[in-house]
Amino acid sequence: MVEPVFLWRRLVGAQIRSQLQYRASFVLDVTGAFLISFIDFVAVLVIFHNVPQLGTWNVHEVALLYAVSSISFALTDLAIGHLDQFPQKVRDGNFDILLVRPRGTLYQVICSDFALRRLGKAAQGGLVLVYALASLHVDWTVGRAALLVVAVPAGTVIFASVWVVGACLAFWTTDGGEFTNAFTYGGTFLAQYPIDIYSAWLRRFLAYVVALAFVCYFPSLYVLGKPDPLGLPRLLDFASPLVALAAALAAGMIWRGAVRHYRSAGG
Amino acid sequence: MRLDWEIARRGWRRYAAYPWATVAGVFTNTIFGFLQAYILLAVFRHRGDVGGYDARDTVTYVWLAQALIMTVYIFGWYEFALRIRDGSIATDLVRPLDPQRYWLAYDLGRAPYHLLFRGVPPFIVGALVFDLRYPSPLAAVAFLVSVTLAVVVSLGFRFLYNSAAFWLLDYRGIATVSVCIVVFFSGMTLPLTFFPGWLRTIANVLPFASILQSPVDIWLGKRHGLELAGTLALQVFWAVVLLGLGRLALRSGSRKLVVQGG
């Protein structure tokens, strides 16, 4: 159990050191990531300029959803966002190299990059979280605080699982990268808003099958002490860590199955 | 003219070469269309009108925006900057063809491919699920003219921020900020009609409304007679201004250009 973590730290540490060599570029990239994600939140504010509530949610409550979704997604993007370039590895046959090394292929892919510049995105989510918590007057209990703290890593694991499953598509077509975007970038966009405003079929598919409702909707309901507008069992509020675990196991299995379809481009 | 046509055909063919990328892109645009449509429809549960748009206008706006996202190429384009950076620009400048004219012709060949294959399919899905608004024959023609102008305005601006690579080793900072501004002020993030008054004023004096809000407003029949002519004229104005600035950047940039290696 210790060895993979140690190796990951060595490999990622090297990535981070190399990225910090070009300070000016790094600062620009972080600022860029911060600005791009800032637009999404300005959109939330502009919507609430026109309307006091979205469904049963006010601007501060949506800010909480937004913050948890953005931070989780930014951390996923930080650690495995380079899966977006994975189809390239399959197309040019470089995946062969991973197959002959004495480590799991998914593990090696995850270790191959670490985009520290995406901290800009996480920082923006963090600021929105501060804004949300400062304006919400949450009635804090140990349970609520604990659930909020657990929600971010659970959300990160859920997003990461979705991303890994999406990347598996590359074993069938290397041009389908944007297909995955619908679930990753689309997923964080969906989770930034209360899922009860979506129509039933979209909600059932993306929120429960793809498990995106467990990123922030259910944990936020509990933290806010809010009745569920959809009237679902309250036990779901605590399900995020379990769902994350199940998602990770499922993603690992799907990856292993998909790798068997790999046919080298030769070379 | 013959040359422009040949370049345009290559622009079309390059994107037509990856049909699965097109299918995947259509899927993603469709999902985003649904998400955005439901989010904005939730606003209309509380009120019937936002800045002159009713629920039907707004949902139509969402699907048109998803349909035009690739046509007007809103999410960043760095090909010209990359050619400056890797020195290929030296070859381009030797050719008896102006680089800006080349990219304009190329882009006008690319845009119809994206309009037909990335724009029409998600719009049809949207039209099957939602009650959308459709243009009069005159508005439909004006819409196509306006989209063409939008592509030129967009290319004009993209060429301009790519030209920053003449002066900056790392063009990405300028490019990222430029893309942010276009995405927000063109009306891609939200219709400009949703903006509070002061923000709308800013959006209206910038060229970016000509990239998305103008063609969509024409489709929705929000501009008639003189106002319609004025909208198109403003798009022409911004196309000329941005292409002109691009020319200046190209001229002064290539004068100081130093290409390393050989």
Image (tube, coloured by chain):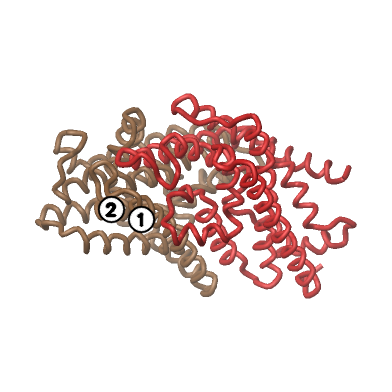
Chain colours: A brown, B red
Q: In this view, does A232 lie to the left or right of A170?
A: left
Q: In which quarter of the image is residue A116?
A: bottom left
Q: Mark 1 points at which residue?
A: A45
Q: Is residue B97 visible?
A: yes
The tag earlier along the polypeptide, 1 or 2, is 1
Q: Mark 2 points at which residue?
A: A59
| Residue A36 at x, y percent in the picture | 47, 58
Q: Quadrant of residue B71?
A: top right
| Residue B224 at x, y percent in the picture | 60, 41
| Residue A145 at x, y percent in the picture | 16, 57
Q: How far apart are marks 1 and 2 (CA)?
A: 7 Å
Q: Residue at x 50, y 36 (%)?
A: B63
Q: Is residue A167 left or right of residue B100?
A: left
Query: How packed is label 1: few (under 14 Cα within 10 Å), some, or many (20 or more)?
Result: some
Q: Residue at x 75, y 47 (%)?
A: B106
Q: Can residue A11 be seen in this view?
A: no
Q: Is residue A31 left or right of residue A47?
A: right
Query: How packed is label 2: few (under 14 Cα within 10 Å), some, or many (20 or more)?
Result: many
Q: Identity of the amino acid at label 1?
A: Leu
Q: Is residue B70 left or right of residue A125?
A: right
Q: Nearer the viewer, residue B157 or A256?
A: B157
